Amino acid sequence: MALPKNTTPDLSFDWQVYADATFAGLSILIPIPLLDVAFEQFFRRRMPVVIARRNGLTLSPSLRMDLNRGRFSCLVACLTWPVLGLIMVLKRLSRNLLYFLTIKESSDQLSLYWHRAFLLDYMCEAGYLADEATAVPAAEALRETLDTIPTSPVNELARQVVYLPHHLLRTLRQARRGQMDAEMEKARSLMARTWDSFGDHFLEVARRYDDIFQQVQARLQAEAEQKAPPKG
């Protein structure tokens, strides 16, 4: 499997790249159990498709599934979902009483989604998703990178954005239809004014992704060679 060519990441702000990431991160603030998860997953799943289309790529259904897959297997997720679902509902209900405790979690989540959007865009630009041979390790490298990189440099901006929407459910419903209200226009403008200050950070994130991709690619290739039947 050949490595994609080296590409300097696009560090400029493009709302098309970060819109769904912003909506997914803000969804946690919806004070209705399970509805918040439904909105978050909708925007999370839409992110790779929109970002790939921006870069002139069409993702296969299997690649979309791989990019949206979490750290745990489907079997583990199915077995633990009832317990996790109960904990999640109780947690969401408690947030209705102590809403301010949700702000930090939402800011952290929003920051993480911005990093995910940046990496998805970079993966498209650099050619990681142009070939199935590199797309598989690229998707795994995405998960491993998001697990290890610091996202705190943009947390303050995320916190400011979290405080902007006053009619969040209406805002997210419009966003699902491709519309943007005045509150999200304020968020977009704030992000556009601030984004250039994070250039060095995101450049380091891209470099870290490249390193992890090479590690994942080498690991998967070694595993494939071990599983291959002996010659002769």
Image (tube, helix red, strand yellow):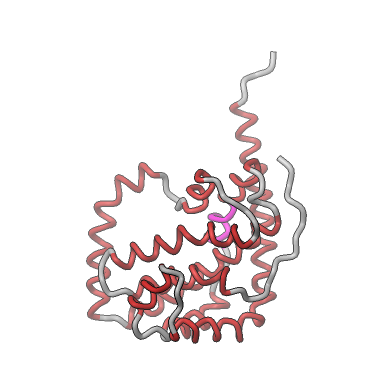
Instruction: State the residue at coordinates (26%, 57%).
Output: 85
Residue 88: where, in percent of width, then height? Answer: 28, 63
**In the image, farthest residue toward the top:** 232
Instruction: State the residue at coordinates (33%, 79%).
Output: 101
Would you place residue 165 above or below residue 89 in this image?
below
Q: Is residue 150 visible?
A: no
Residue 182 among magenta residues: no
Magenta stretch, overall SS: helix
Would you place residue 127 above or below residue 31 in this image?
above
Q: Is residue 9 visible?
A: yes
Instruction: Identify the image quadrant of the N terminus.
Output: top right
Q: Nearer the viewer, residue 1 or 21?
A: 21
Residue 230: where, in percent of width, then height? Answer: 65, 19
Would you place residue 133 above or below residue 16 in this image?
above
Instruction: Identify the image quadrant of the C terminus.
Output: top right
Identify the image quadrant of residue 83. Answer: bottom left
Identify the image quadrant of residue 200. Answer: bottom right
Left or right for 35, reference 120? left
Residue 145 among magenta residues: yes
Instruction: State the residue at coordinates (68%, 68%).
Output: 204
**In the image, farthest residue toward the right:** 6
Residue 149: where, in percent of width, then height? Answer: 58, 65
Instruction: State the residue at coordinates (41%, 45%).
Output: 73
Residue 65: where, in percent of width, then height? Answer: 48, 48
Q: Nearer the viewer, residue 8 or 104?
A: 8
- Give the magenta range: 141-148
